[in-house]
Amino acid sequence: MSTAPPAAASGDVADRAAAGFRAGYGEAPAGRWAAPGRANLIGEHTDYNDGFVLPFALTLRTVVAAAPQPGERWTVRSELSDTPVEFGAAEVGEPGRVTGWGAYVAGVVWALREAGHRVPGARIAIASDVPLGSGLSSSAALEAAVLAALVDLGGLDLPAEKRPRLAQRAENAYVGAPTGIMDQSAVIRCRPGHVLFLDCRTEAVEHIPFDLDAAGLAVLVVDSRAPHRHVDGEYAARRAACERAASLLGVPALRDVAVADLDGALARLDDEEIRRRVRHVVTEDQRVLDTVGLLRAGRIREIGPLLTASHVSMRDDFEITVPEIDTAVEAALAAGALGARMTGGGFGGCVLALVEADQADPVARAVAQAYADRGFPAPRTVLPAP
């Protein structure tokens, strides 16, 4: 499901959002707006390098129930917190005034106001089944759902194709998480049954069919239970290293280094760590393009080795995996997965594995057993339908 255009939410999580609104505010909401979580099939840490990504939407969703509120005041309730967050125009006037989970909502209000929109006051209730801190873009789903609600409530002129950049600004400049454009683009622009081929420089998109059922395949998503945090120093350090490398190489972004020119580019860099970062980004961009070529040709099974190669690159060159993640990938591959990789920003989060449809349960059990053998908390697995 996508919020482009915004769609009325339905189902259990939508009912929870509406019930939370009624319990908190004593009346029914004016409407409900939903945005999905996302998994990235391939293309990690390429988005802020102006490169290519290939995400798809999950069936897991965040739902916002909302109604107008007089004046420039916003009240937000979440099923995950007993305490509502309230702020007005003064508090939302500059980044850092609203903190915690409420900052994601305040950031959207702030970004809309910064873009010149007259944002309606609102009462909001949030419910979600996108796991927090799992690398499935729970924050982007929240931002997109809130954005859709405020646009509709205020009758704002903000086409769907312009919403990802605004939501990204909310997360970058207000919340302080230096994410690229992929997450917000995916939760707003993905279509069911497709992967979203996104050029992060031009923001051009292509919806590529991804019919797993017809191929007899499934994508198994494993929540490693090792939560990641984008606002810590590691994600920012990777981004800074990439920007420094681009400057040293005299290119606008690492997307401008072709695979054929990689060896020459690496030879111009003195720092071995920066060389590894560059090698990952350049080869990862090429893996996205190779994956797109195979999917266009209907050769889904053949993308497995590219997924696994992506994981090896993230583990060895970008150094963003953790033992739980590596254990899940290794166990899935040993149990017969066609390919497996970490998805998301790293340092925790989720693994996705491409499997034969009738092998999803055995692969999931193999990962769970590997976790038990290592003494890790049991992982959670889902079979999202892209």
Image: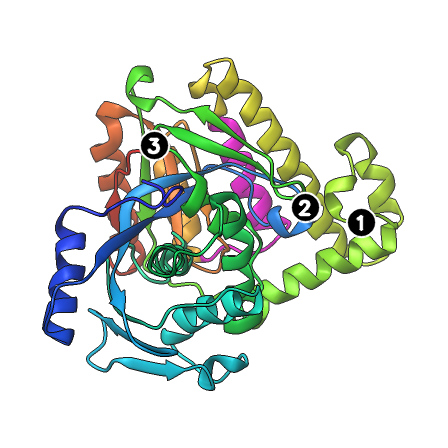
- In-image side of 270 versus 149 (left or right): right
Give the Cα separation between the discs numbered 2 and 3: 25 Å
Few, some or many residues within 10 Å of mark 1 (<14, 14–19, 20+): few
Q: How far from the left and from the top, in percent, is residue 126?
A: 25, 64
Q: Main secondary structure of the magenta part?
A: helix
Residue 273 seen in this snapshot = no
Q: How far from the left and from the top, in percent, is residue 185?
A: 49, 46
Q: How far from the left and from the top, in percent, is residue 215?
A: 33, 16
Q: Could you tell me which residue is drawn at 54 percent across and 49 percent down?
A: 162
Callout 1: SS? loop
Q: Amino acid at mark 1?
A: Pro
Callout 2: SS? loop
From the viewer's perspective, is residue 56 above or below residue 89?
above
Check disc 2 and report the residue beneath it: 50
Q: Amino acid at mark 2?
A: Asp
Mark 1 and mark 3 in contact (Cβ < 8 Å)? no
Callout 3: SS? loop
Q: Could you tell me which residue is drawn at 37 percent across and 54 percent down?
A: 148
From the viewer's perspective, is residue 199 above or below residue 69?
above
Which residues make up the magenta segment? 304-322
- For marks 1 and 2, the one nearer the N-term is 2
Check disc 3 and report the residue beneath it: 192
